[in-house]
Image (cartoon, rainbow, N blue to C red):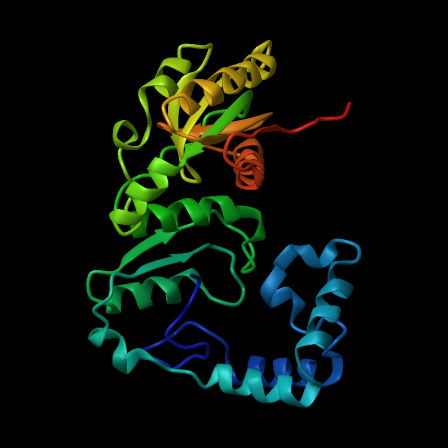
Amino acid sequence: MATPARYSQDLPDFPWGFTAAEIEAQLDDTTNRWGEGALFELFNGEASDVPGAREMFGRLQRSMMSPAMAKLWWQALTEVDVRAVLRSVRAPTLVMARPGDQLVPIEAAAALAADIPNAAFHSLPPGAHNMADITDQIASLALNFICDAPTAPADEGVLKTVMFHRHRRFDRLLSARGGRTLATSAGQPRPTRRSHALPGTAVSAPTTPAMASSRCSTAPTKAVRCALDLVPALATRQIPIRSASTPGECERRGQEWSGMAVHTGARIGALASAGEVLTSRNRA
């Protein structure tokens, strides 16, 4: 991400990067102002005008290394040159950069991508090298590249009640398959599927084998009643289950749900023993 093959100029083959005079000035800045925000503009651009930003950058520098070590580090950085090995890279590669980056010119990053076989290059919105303002976009691009498929955008956050239930039969089946995910129909007994006839939909979540969700207007009480009916019904079939529910904000991507309510419900469910029904208590 925003990476060049080298940081200093090597005319005429590499016209981007810092000149010898610029590097000398940077080394002087590192020596004299390390811990006070040295090199701030290179990394953060216009954020240098934000009150307190340079001071925060200085505190980070002081926590990293001494001025003498910082000067050696910057000197080594400006001497890096990996152009000779780029053609030997065989791993799938995504290079991202943005116009206006004072540390890595976008042209240098594009040249890096051009020299790596089959590399993909993506131009980001203009801005500073730290890219703190576009982290969501960077994460989405990286996921799409790694997963080789577009990620579904999250629906708008909605208030839902989520209910988790797990039973020993599922655990044994999961163990027998070496931990591989089981289809819901294989791991979930029929009475639990019937219980999803309550206001809600049987959906999947990464943290649990079976989860029902429903709207939050009257659902918190209905979710608890569902679990209280479900526990004895399955106990008569020698299927002890544990159940948990909690209301909260959720996001949906396709058939999977995520969000704070999902994580909270999964944690509550992990505390339950067979035959127990646990729920969260939200205070106004």
Measured as percent of width and height from the top left, residue 245 is found at 56, 26
Residue at the image point whose x is 24% and y is 72% from the top: 89
Measured as percent of width and height from the top left, residue 35 is found at 74, 76
Residue at the image point whose x is 30% and y is 63% from the top: 113
Give the total of numbered labels: 0
Which quadrant would the C terminus be assigned to in this image? top right
- Residue 240 is drawn in which quadrant? top left
Q: In this image, 81 relative to 93: left or right?
A: right
- Residue 196 is drawn in which quadrant? top left
Measured as percent of width and height from the top left, residue 146 is found at 31, 52
143 vs 254: above or below: below
Residue at the image point whose x is 75% and y is 63% from the top: 56
Which quadrant would the N terminus be assigned to in this image? bottom left
267 vs 94: above or below: above
- Which of 271/109 is in front? 271
106 vs 254: above or below: below
- Which of 210/79 is in front? 210
